[in-house]
Image (cartoon, rainbow, N blue to C red):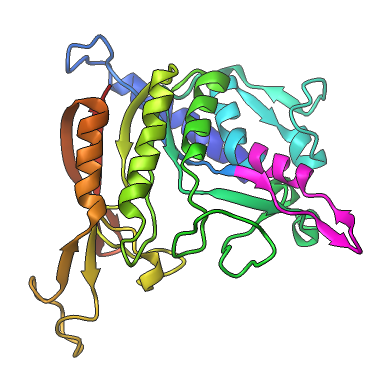
């Protein structure tokens, strides 16, 4: 019911916005372009569990179900009008012959673009806790911190134990193109890197994959890097391992005696990524149409976010 209502809320919001915004303000013959931000992950099955060399738990189906629910389900609903209640109840993916696979005509094409949040590749395993819960439609459980999971082979990790996998950004952009035929606005992409070791090459590698997607026909209308400055991560607070900022803040510097920080109390340092994101954007696209600084307000704290838009 919650998921159904969430989809309904999006549909009604889309309808209202597109009804009210009917003026072509910039002369491009498009009065509005409405989309939503959606976290997607490159998903792969975790290494299977074995006893005496024999596989006791295959994670393939868990990974497929996780990808279907986390990446595809909401988009299928607001683009194709699909409500796959059969999957939620049986874990049969997209069984269109089921009476519980419902097509809502009034849900179709309720997004003009997909906002893609991409950070990492995840390894998903079958979890008895998930499968026995009321949320078994999630499909499986991802290994959240690969720093503490020693049995799973992986690539380079960021400070939160997330695998850095630039190719996944290309794969997901192309999936949105081929599966839903929608434009993509990359609404979040960044790295937790307190020592600024990987941020610059991370940006280079991911923007390269964006360029490859554009070359191969994807309509990428923008790239938004997360984030402009170090911010409060919901799960990690201001823990050093959660530093995503292009500009880093030293919170151990300045007046810590219970007084509010004055404007110059905290040391702000530009990272290599701050320089590289502009150099890469200029090299890849030739034209930087605009760079704007906006803010995300959480409670009484304001966190700046850099939005870099570009044209190919």
Horizontal arrangement in the rendering, residue 165 relative to residue 50 (left or right): left
State the quadrant of the C terminus: top left
Residue 289's x, y, as percent? 17, 28
Horizontal arrangement in the rendering, residue 281 relative to residue 148 (left or right): left
Q: Is residue 73 magenta?
A: no
| Residue 185 seen | no
The outermost residue toward the bottom is: 257
Horizontal arrangement in the rendering, residue 272 relative to residue 66 (left or right): left
Q: Establish if 40 lies above or below 28.
A: below
**Residue at the image point whose x is 17% and y is 64% from the top:** 269
Residue 207's x, y, as percent? 35, 36
Q: Establish if 163 lies above or below 40.
A: below
Q: Establish if 96 lies above or below 305.
A: above
**Residue at the image point whose x is 36% and y is 56% from the top:** 198
In the image, 81 versus 305, the foreground residue is 305
* Residue 32 lies in quadrant: top left
**Residue at the image point whose x is 22% and y is 68% from the top:** 249
- Badge count: 0
- The magenta region covers 43-68
Residue 76's x, y, as percent? 60, 27
**Residue at the image point whose x is 92% and y is 64% from the top:** 52
Residue 291's x, y, as percent? 17, 38
State the quadrant of the N terminus: top right
């Amino acid at each position: 019911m919650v998921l159904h209502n969430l989809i309904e809320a999006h549909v009604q919001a889309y309808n209202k916005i597109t009804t009210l915004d009917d003026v072509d303000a910039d002369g491009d013959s498009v009065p509005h372009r409405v989309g939503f931000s959606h976290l997607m992950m490159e998903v792969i099955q975790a290494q299977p569990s074995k006893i005496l060399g024999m596989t006791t738990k295959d994670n393939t189906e868990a990974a497929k179900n996780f990808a279907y629910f986390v990446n595809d389900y909401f988009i299928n609903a607001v683009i194709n009008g699909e409500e796959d209640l059969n999957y939620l109840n049986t874990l049969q993916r997209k069984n269109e012959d089921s009476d519980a696979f419902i097509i809502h005509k009034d849900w179709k094409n309720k997004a003009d673009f997909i906002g893609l949040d991409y950070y990492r590749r995840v390894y998903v395993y079958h979890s008895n806790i998930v499968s026995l819960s009321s949320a078994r439609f999630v499909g499986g459980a991802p290994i959240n911190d690969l720093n503490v999971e020693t049995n799973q082979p992986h690539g380079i990790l960021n400070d939160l134990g997330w695998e850095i996998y630039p190719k996944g950004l290309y794969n997901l952009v192309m999936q949105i193109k081929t599966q839903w035929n929608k434009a993509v606005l990359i609404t979040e992409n960044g790295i937790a890197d307190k020592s600024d070791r990987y941020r610059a090459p991370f940006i280079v590698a991911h923007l390269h994959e964006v360029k490859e997607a554009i070359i191969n026909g994807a309509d990428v209308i923008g790239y938004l890097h997360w984030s402009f400055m170090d911010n409060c991560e919901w799960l990690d607070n201001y823990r050093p391992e959660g530093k995503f900022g292009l500009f880093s803040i030293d919170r151990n510097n300045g007046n810590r005696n219970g007084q509010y920080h004055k404007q110059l109390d905290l040391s702000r340092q530009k990272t290599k990524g701050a320089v590289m994101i502009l150099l890469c954007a200029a090299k890849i696209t030739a034209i930087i149409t605009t760079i704007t600084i906006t803010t995300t307000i959480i409670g009484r704290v304001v966190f700046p976010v850099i939005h870099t838009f570009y044209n190919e």
